[in-house]
């Protein structure tokens, strides 16, 4: 029974609403709707005015510029630190690859005359593969070094901008980070240059040993052929 009563009330409300839609509005009803619309507009307007917009009242343009300069130096410092780390890792891996190649060359020179052709070919395959890795590491160093130089210049410009805008602390921090990054990269670069020098010395030694080995093989071959010549003359 309760459900039937609710349905009856629901349909009666629908009918009354339909009649009101097609009924010509009277002056009293139009005034009533106008009052309702005004009340809704005031409520919505009041709600919008109540939204807490964040406003900065007591900051001058100079203060805002200093804040922006500080943000720029922070971003530049982050960019510089990431590129510095990438370059140092690349230089370190390059130095390791070069030292591995030097060890392979030394092992090959120490085994001259003691290896079978198959063993010698196997060692040379490893040496060639390691040379390829050295070249790849060197290319990575060049890429990261180019990015690092750009980061250094950007950080220097940010430090200058911070100093001009009055953000002295941000400028000092950026300059300090530049000095630290430069000193760390110089240490890694020195290690890679030392590795290059050792590799060049190993190549010179390899050429000398190969020349000596070839000469000794030629001399031994001549010594083996000499008795046969004497025998023919007899």
Image (cartoon, rainbow, N blue to C red):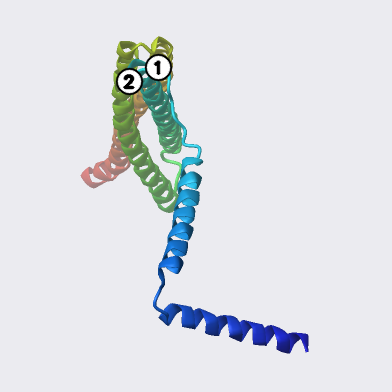
Which residue is at the front of the view, 124 or 175?
175
Q: Residue at x 30, y 17 (%)?
A: 161
Q: Residue at x 54, y 81 (%)?
A: 16
Quarter assignment of residue 147? top left
Q: Residue at x 36, y 17 (%)?
A: 60
Inter-mark Cα distance, 1 to 2: 8 Å
Q: Which mark is residue 8?
A: none
Secondary-structure class at tag 1: helix
- Residue 82: x and y in percent read 43, 31
Which residue is at the front of the view, 154 or 112?
154
Residue 21's place in the image compared with 145, above or below, is below
Residue farthest left in this picture: 233
Q: Which residue is mark 2?
A: 158
Q: Residues within 10 Å of mark 2 (few under 14, many from 20)?
A: many
- Can residue 204 be seen by looking at this rendering? no
- Residue 211: x and y in percent read 29, 32
Instruction: Kindly check if marks 1 and 2 are in contact, taking CB atoms under 8 A apart as contact.
Output: yes
Residue 70's place in the image compared with 35, above or below, is above
Q: Earlier in the sequence, mark 1 or mark 2?
A: 2
Q: Which residue is mark 1?
A: 174
């Amino acid at each position: 029974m309760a459900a039937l009563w609710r349905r009856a009330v629901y349909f009666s409300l629908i009918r009354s609403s339909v009649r009101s839609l097609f009924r010509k509005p009277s002056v009293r009803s139009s005034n009533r709707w106008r009052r309702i619309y005004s009340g809704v507009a005031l409520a919505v307007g009041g709600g919008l005015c109540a939204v807490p917009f964040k406003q900065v009242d007591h900051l001058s343009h100079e203060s805002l510029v200093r804040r922006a300069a500080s943000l720029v130096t922070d971003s530049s410092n982050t960019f510089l630190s990431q590129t510095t780390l990438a370059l140092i890792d690349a230089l370190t891996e390059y130095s390791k690859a070069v030292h591995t190649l030097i060890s392979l060359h030394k092992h090959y020179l120490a085994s001259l005359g003691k290896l079978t052709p198959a063993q010698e070919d196997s060692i040379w395959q490893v040496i060639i593969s390691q040379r390829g890795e050295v070249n790849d590491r060197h290319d990575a160093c060049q890429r990261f070094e180019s990015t690092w130089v750009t980061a250094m210049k950007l950080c220097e410009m940010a430090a200058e901008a911070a100093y001009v805008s009055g953000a002295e602390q941000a400028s000092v921090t950026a300059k300090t980070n530049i000095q630290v990054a430069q000193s760390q990269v110089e240490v890694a670069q020195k290690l890679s240059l030392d590795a290059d020098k050792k590799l060049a010395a190993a190549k010179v030694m390899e050429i000398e040993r190969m020349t000596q080995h070839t000469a000794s093989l030629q001399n031994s071959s001549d010594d083996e052929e000499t008795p046969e010549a004497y025998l023919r003359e007899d």
